[in-house]
Amino acid sequence: MPRIVRCGVIQATCEWSPEKYSLADIKEKMIAKHEKLIASAAKKDVQILGLQELFYGPYFCAEQNARWYELTESVPNGPTLVRMQKLAKKYKMVLVVPIYEVEMAGLFYNTAAVFDADGSYLGKYRKHHIPHCHPGFWEKFYFTPGNAGYPVFETRFGKVGVYICYDRHFPEGARILGLNGAEIVFNPSATVAGLSEYLWELEQPAHAVANQYFVAAINRVGTEKPWSIGEFYGKSYFCNPRGKIVAQGSRDKDELVVADLDFDEIKDVRATWQFYRDRRPESYDEIVRTRTPGMPQAAD
């Protein structure tokens, strides 16, 4: 009998500009918007639901300004996560909730907390790869690189991994999530049209194929003022272990994307493609030993 899990992702606009609204008002409006969308997911019997990167505000990394530190919260006891935890329990739904985390004064992470369907807090993933290379993506001003590994969370409905936005450009962590047992990997993102848009439907299906699990790719939508970094193009989707996109959202509107995924498909694909059997980890030392191009070689 197939093991069907109904999964969902939410993509949403942030139409409230910090030029006109306080950060607290924007945060409350975005949380309220998502609470309605989460309720819609519950009505559709979604069992595992993922939200977009930094879901309760705009993508503030478009500028470098310490005012945005006001949005940080502790994990798991910050007020936003307490609200999300109650919803997870109310709707008997696993929630993947991206958050701007503060560990101590001046130490911040781009994090996602995971709650099980009974509301219990299962743990968090901290974004490892932090970009600071394109105009409007000044993340090193806000985030410390993640230091909590690549955990996989045993939920009521399946084994869930998390990778966040820019992480998707790095296959190493995606492989570790597979080795750690992930059946589905959620990638909450904030990415705009232009340079890397063609990679949106290339890299993550490639991770799904190479690691033979499902991927849930989440992107926000709209153009956020007052910045001019481009249009967040949505197109959130689910991809199966064969690399096929099986459900996808629109480019330009708030949307709940839902897919019924047969987690038994993972076993079928792995019985055909024996990638884990045929790995040669003893031959991969160069991945961690080889210097970064253009950087001097460290002495042994």
Image (tube, rainbow, N blue to C red):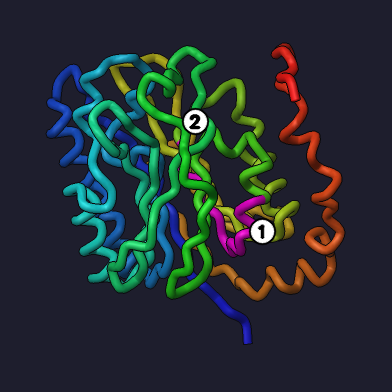
Give the image quarter of residue 184.
Answer: bottom right
Q: Does the rendering let one see residue 248?
A: no
- Horizontal side, residue 167 vs residue 125: left or right: right
Q: How many marks?
A: 2
Amino acid type for the residue under numbered disc 1: Leu
Asked which secondary structure carries label 1, the reply is: helix
In-image side of 241 versus 195 (left or right): right
Q: Secondary structure at mark 2?
A: loop
Please give the name of the residue rendered at 78% of the width and 60% of the height, measured from the top-left corner: 276
* Residue lying at 83% horizontally and 49% vertically, measured from the top left: 282
Q: Are marks 1 and 2 in contact (CB under 8 Å)?
A: no
Q: CA distance from mark 1 to mark 2?
A: 27 Å
> How far from the left and from the top, in percent, is residue 15?
27, 31
Query: Please, is residue 248 above or below residue 169 in the view?
Result: below
Q: Which residues are magenta?
A: 176-189
Residue plotted at (18% across, 17% down): 19
Residue under circle 1? 179
Query: Which residue is tagged 2?
Result: 191
Q: Earlier in the sequence, mark 1 or mark 2?
A: 1
Q: Nearer the viewer, residue 111 or 238?
A: 111
When the figure is inspected, residue 64 is found, relative to residue 115, above or below; the finding is above
- How packed mark 1 is, by other alpha carbons closer than 10 Å (few <14, some 14-19, many 20 or more), is few
Q: Say which of 289 and 217 sits in front.
A: 289
Whether the magenta-drawn stretch holds residue 195 is answered as: no
Residue 273: where, in percent of width, then height?
83, 63
